[in-house]
Amino acid sequence: MKPGQRREIALWLCRLMLGVMVSTMALSLTACGKEGDPQPPGPANEITYPRAYPPD
């Protein structure tokens, strides 16, 4: 192995690992988002929340 070759390999591995980490973080952030506001389950006429506490 040449003297400068070890450093080149180390730099290449660091760049590769940095690229993998950035890609992983970017993909994980895009996977957790949902479109629109959260909707309660069930038909709209049966949704009882939000309501006042304590109930009358």
Image (cartoon, rainbow, N blue to C red):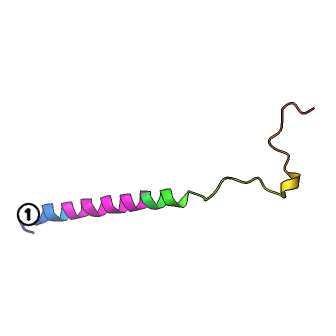
Camera-nearest residue between 50 and 21: 50
- Determine whether, in the image, residue 43 is placed left or right of residue 38: right
Q: Does the magenta stretch include residue 35?
A: no
Q: Going by the image, does 56 lie left or right of 3?
A: right
The spot of residue 33 in percent (x, y) is: 56, 57
- The majority secondary structure of the magenta stretch comes to helix
Identity of the residue drawn at 29% across and 64% down:
16
**Which residue is pictured at 88% across the width and 53% down the height?**
46
In-front residue for pair 36/23: 36
Residue closest to the far right? 56
Q: Is residue 47 above or below residue 43?
A: above
Quarter holding the N terminus is bottom left
In the rendered structure, which amino acid carries the disc numbered 1? Answer: Gly
Side of 52 where 17 appears, left or right: left
Q: Alpha-carbon neighbours of circle 1 within 10 Å: few (<14), some, or many (≥20)?
A: few
Camera-side residue of 47 and 29:
47
Q: Is mark 1 on a helix, strand or loop?
A: helix
Q: Where is residue 49 in the image (x, y as percent from the top left)?
A: 81, 44
Tell whether position 15 is magenta. yes
| Residue 19 in the image, given as x and y percentages of width and height | 32, 62
Instruction: Magenta stretch: give its range.
Output: 11-25
Name the residue beneath numbered marker 1: 4
**Residue at 88% from the left image edge and 54% from the top image edge:** 45
The number of numbered discs placed on residues in the rendered structure image is 1
Q: Residue furthest left?
A: 3
Task: Give the image location of residue 15, x and y in percent.
Answer: 26, 61
* Residue 12 quadrant: bottom left
Residue at image point 79% right, 56% down: 41
Q: Is residue 49 left or right of residue 12?
A: right
Of the 4 image quadrants, the one containing the C terminus is: top right
Extreme-bottom residue of the structure? 1
